[in-house]
Amino acid sequence: MTSTMPIFSPIDYQTSATALPRPENVSTQIDLWIDEAIWGHRLYDEQVPWLTVLECLGVAFAEYREGRMFDEPASRLLKYRPAVQLRLRNILFNSPRIALIAEHGGDDASCWATWLEEMQRDSGGFADPSYEYVQGHFESFRAFAEVVKFLRGSTIQGPNNKRWSSQFLFPFGPSAVYEDLEAKKTSYSIDRRFFQRTGELLYLMLARSGAGQALRRHLEGRFIKAALPFERLVSVLQGEKQLCISAKEGPYLPFANRPEYVRLSDDWLALFRRSLPGYDVWPHLVTMSGLNLLLYFLGRAREEVGEAGRPELVLEIVSARKTDVRELSAESFAQNNLLPQRALAAHIARVTASDEWMTALVKEDPILEAMQLLRRRFLWEREDDATETVKDPNDLIAELQQRALTRHRVHTAKIHSTWGKAVGLVSRRLSRRTRYAPTDALLKTLVVCCVEDRMEFSAFVELLYDRYGLVIGDRQAARVPLTAGADLELFHDNVARLEERLSGLGLVRRLSDQCAYVENPFAGNIA
């Protein structure tokens, strides 16, 4: 076996692209256009990576039906009709007595009759529930109950107390991907409680990456046209596909192209090419999607405050004892955690350097002119719209800053920490301070994604820095302002712990004192 070089092309993280125009109808949905202008409409902390990928797949499969999956010009507003799959969801999540009927319902015919009567009475979301088609696909009601039990065990996020119309299946195939709904007895409406558009942004990033054709080919070959046994089970329970009555629209991604989009699609394609068994690719795709969205979030914040280059994250490979690397990692987290708030302030302050602001200040009523400018630029409506309460136009900027910060702290400010924990990057293990400390699951995903066959260990550590800004070893720490003055021997120990961790996972083989290789257990590319 020979060593392979990194499979990714170099990415230029310097960008000076101009933001796309704000959608015309967005003023009816947004009360303050600042977070959305920086990152898009919208990134949302409570939409964890799994739900983000499910929403993204809902868009992709809907656009596939229209013949345009990942073919989305930035000039066209995304508009699509996702599946709702109400019969499937009623069976799996709104029919709690299936197991009880199977055990105590009598003979097979009686079990089917009892269940069909209950479903006719208790189903929600549509006016004419009919489930007779299900019986013809199973040799017995008890066999049907076992299938339902298995699929219920595949619920994303495990058992939870969400309403039945907001329970989501593992993506076994297109039939298992559907929209978040609020369901009543005979009707439903699209709800944004758990699908807050973050998945739509993920889809748009992939579509704008330049790799749409390759992504489409892999999704089609692996999931849309593949003969997947569990997809067959799900489609049997659903019967004829049910689509949303009306189309969804309205996401906004600020830039037509960015290096983060390319990195994201490269990661997806790398994982698709691995010889991973069946559905095993999805957890890795979810992790890498969450990591890329997190880095996009921090990268845009750096750009807004005028800091060049991609974000840098100092990782502690967890040690049994406290070290300076742990403290530097915690400091790195804290600095990055403040970036979005600084970006918010910089974005608002930038208006005061604009020609429009200068013009407003020399008008007969500068305060009124300034208020109107801020309303146009940020969709800001003051609670007190009277000009008599404002002494100086700069007071309006201060007031807007405070209003924006209060709104920002509710959700957007939590993205860094929440998503970092969700992908296994952020931890408080053995410490009172939050810092970057990767889990074994994240490390394994990084190996599966980044190593085509095998790679020298030092080259792998360098790739993680070049590609994702992950600072682990002494060579990387020497190039980062936060750690440049630190004792680099501590980072030498840090990278040694990484090798030990990966070796324990069966992902590193040391051939001699000077030669260690990271090995991908799923080497061997699929075309």
Image (spheres, grey):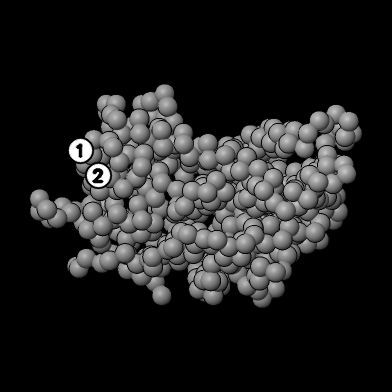
Is label 1 in a helix, a strand or a loop? helix
Residue 432's place in the image compared with 420, above or below, is above
Give the residue at x 73% y 57%: 22
Q: Residue 152 carries which label?
A: none
Give the residue at x 67% y 48%: 353
Callout 2 touching callout 1 (CB < 8 Å): yes
The x and y percentages for residue 320 are: 27, 28
Where on the picture, by quarter, is residue 207?
A: bottom right
Q: Which corner quadrant holds the C terminus?
A: bottom left
Amino acid type, callout 1: Glu
Give the residue at x 37% y 35%: 329
The x and y percentages for residue 480 are: 34, 45
Q: How far apart are marks 2 and 1 (CA)?
A: 7 Å
Q: Is residue 346 left or right of residue 509?
A: right
Is label 2 in a helix, a strand or a loop? helix
Q: In this view, does 257 lie to the left or right of 356?
A: left
Q: Residue furthest left?
A: 513
Q: Is residue 12 left or right of residue 487?
A: right
Where on the picture, by quarter, is residue 98?
A: top right
Amino acid type, callout 2: Asp
Return the residue at label 1.
489
- The mark that comes first in sequence, 2 or 1, is 2
Return the residue at label 2.
474
Asked whether 298 or 355 is in front, the reply is 355
Task: Using a 10 Å C-alpha cutoff, classify the residue at mark 1 as few (fewer than 14 neighbours), some (14 to 19) or many (20 or more).
Answer: few
Residue 80 seen from this side: no
Asked whether 369 or 521 is in front, the reply is 369
